[in-house]
């Protein structure tokens, strides 16, 4: 599978090695698969804004999220990216794109 994974944290691009790109792809794919009425991931955009709001766009369509998934997804993503090289402060904003 050819995939492209791009990550920006606090408006700074983060370099991803093969392991981290694959890990993010699989974790976020699992998160999306657990949500109602989602399908195969071809293009995914996940954003967390500075107010903690999470948005997911899957294959060109917005995925509706209630407060609980917003909190779980936001905390999970912050926890995953916080220790990455290049993330030097608290994760205030996050943009992740996955293309398969």
Image (cartoon, rainbow, N blue to C red):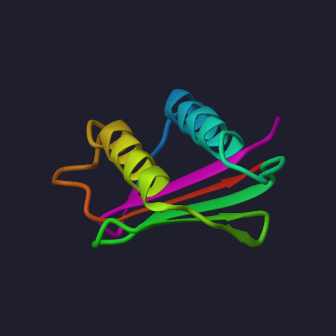
User: Residue 58, position in %: x, y?
Assistant: 72, 61
Magenta stretch, overall SS: strand
The image quadrant that residue 67 belongs to is bottom left
Residue found at x 81% / y 53%: 42
Residue found at x 71% / y 41%: 33
Quarter of the image with the N terminus is top right
Residue found at x 43% / y 52%: 68
Q: Is residue 21 above or below residue 78?
A: above
* Residue farthest toward the top in the current orientation of the protein: 19
Q: Is residue 85 left or right of residue 90?
A: right
Nearest to the observer: residue 18 or residue 92: 92
Asked if residue 11 is among those painted magenta in the image, a careful observer would answer yes
Residue stretch in magenta: 1-13
User: Residue 72, position in %: x, y?
Assistant: 41, 45
Q: Is residue 89 left or right of residue 13?
A: left
Nearest to the observer: residue 73 or residue 78: 73
Nearest to the observer: residue 53 or residue 41: 53
Q: Is residue 35 left or right of residue 37?
A: left
């Amino acid at each position: 599978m050819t995939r492209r994974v791009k990550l920006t944290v606090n408006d700074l691009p983060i370099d991803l090695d093969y392991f981290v790109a694959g890990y993010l792809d699989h974790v976020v794919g699992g998160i999306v698969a657990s949500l109602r009425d989602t399908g195969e991931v071809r293009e995914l955009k996940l954003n967390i804004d500075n107010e903690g709001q999470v948005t997911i766009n899957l294959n060109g369509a917005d995925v509706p999220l209630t407060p609980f998934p917003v909190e779980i997804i936001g905390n999970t993503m912050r926890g995953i990216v916080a220790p990455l090289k290049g993330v030097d402060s608290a994760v205030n904003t996050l943009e992740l794109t996955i293309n398969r």
